[in-house]
Image (cartoon, helix red, strand yellow):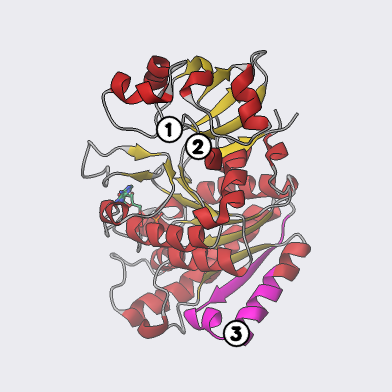
Amino acid sequence: MNVIAAGVRRNARIVVKIGTNLITDRLAGLNLERINSLARGVSLLRTSGHGVVVVSSGAIGAGAAARRLKERPRSMAEKQATAAIGQPILMEAYEAAFRRHALTVAQILLTREDFAIRGRYLNARNTIAVLLENGVVPVINENDTVAVEEIRLGDNDTLSAMVANLIGADLLIILSDIDGFYTDDPSRNPRAEFVPVVEAITPKIERQARKTGGESGTGGMATKIQAAKRCMSAGIAMIIANGGNPRILQEIVSGGYRGTLFLPSAARLSVKKKWIGFVSHPRGSVRIDAGAEAALTLHRKSLLPSGVLEVSGEFAEKDTIAVLDTAGNEIARGLCRFSSADLAKIRGKKTGDVEKILGRRSGGEVIHKDYLVLLGR
Ligand code: ADP
């Protein structure tokens, strides 16, 4: 089944944000092997027709190594000087890595004012558009040298979300040293649980994203959640995934990836649906009867437990699953409201009995129509 059939335009615009910890080895400088594998991933996205913009941190790390500093610079002036030394070293590494894939890179340095002043905003947008049209990979960073404290964006998570808005991106991929968003910082709390899909940024989620990240990273999870908020309200999907996996970009685009997907807000439902079909890899499936198939395909209704004949695979609540007709053909995909274990208990049952069987309150639908994408045959 070609998931592109679910309606995502083939030539998507994708912003890839690369975190500090991913490409710098503390004070030892840039991790060239990592930069090479990321460049390879980006080049594969390009050859499959997507326009890609990179937002990369790492200038201070590269500069600190060049200056043989014993610790990361602390004062603003020291940081800016170190970034000024590191930025060309960073670009040199990207230039060399992308050249192996016959791709040209372009450096763009932005400040908050470039987004606030309309003339500059339009100019930045036009420049990036021309670069993308010409098959160039823009590599963006904050212009640290001129950005005094008051006008600093301060972290590249925010910058990448603003760039995604600027270019009208379909997807922002934040690559970090962690595979997604957890209910707490897993490096401090071993009981933190992985969250595969986030539909809305609630105060609880904001609390779960602690401020601190790694010691050299600037944002941690808090700025990533704010970036998600910005993207979701603009109809842009966002994924946090681990850039340590050299195949992560291909896996995201083909659908079988580990990462946290932040869905565009309800006001952009069609966009959200598109992304369920495009970026979510089904973790399991349900086979449904002919009546349910007609309800879904002809009447655009939600899938109810009574129409489910069989449950396959192991999945959790809110995982994406495939919906199969009686013959086993995939006809739709959607976010399932029940885990596979619960669904096995309520399959074929009346909606009114679900609460009694599971012993807890729950919405009646297995897949709500707003979270269901028909694939069409
Ligand atoms: P980057 O340099 O890639 O932007 P950071 O180090 O700034 O990355 O942020 C990622 C770190 O945030 C993780 O390694 C983790 O320790 C921390 N973190 C804090 N809260 C959470 C959470 N709820 N889920 C996942 N990671 C979290």
Q: Amino acid at mark 2?
A: His
Task: From the image, tell me which residue sits under label 1.
Answer: 337
Whichever of labels 1 and 2 marks the residue nearer the N terminus, that label is 1
The span picked out in magenta is 103-128
Task: Look at 68% across and 46% down and name the residue there.
Answer: 8
Q: Write down the residue under mark 2.
A: 368
Task: Indicate which label's residue lies in the foreground, 1 or 2.
Answer: 2
- Sequence-wise, the earlier of marks 2 and 3 is 3
The percent coordinates of residue 5 (x first, y second) are 72, 37
**What residue type is disc 3 on?**
Arg
10 Å neighbourhood of mark 1: few (<14), some, or many (≥20)?
many
- Where does the N terminus fall, quadrant-wise? top right
The residue under the point 57% across, 26% down is: 322
Residue 329 is left or right of residue 267, and the answer is right
CB atoms at circles 1 and 2 under 8 Å apart?
Answer: yes
C-alpha separation, residue under disc 1 versus residue under disc 2:
8 Å
Measuring from the top left, give residue 130's x and y in whole percent.
75, 70
Q: Is residue 148 visible?
A: no
Q: Earlier in the sequence, mark 1 or mark 3?
A: 3
Q: Is residue 138 above or below residue 359?
A: below
Closer to the camera in the image, 175 or 375? 375
In space, the residues marked 2 and 3 are separated at their CA atoms by 41 Å
Does the magenta segment cover residue 116? yes
List x then y, in percent, for residue 196: 42, 39
Left or right of 125? Residue 184 is left
Which quadrant is the C terminus positioned in? top right
What mark, if any, has residue 325 been given in the picture?
none
Dot 3 corresponds to which residue?
Answer: 118
CA–CA distance in space, label 1 to label 3: 43 Å
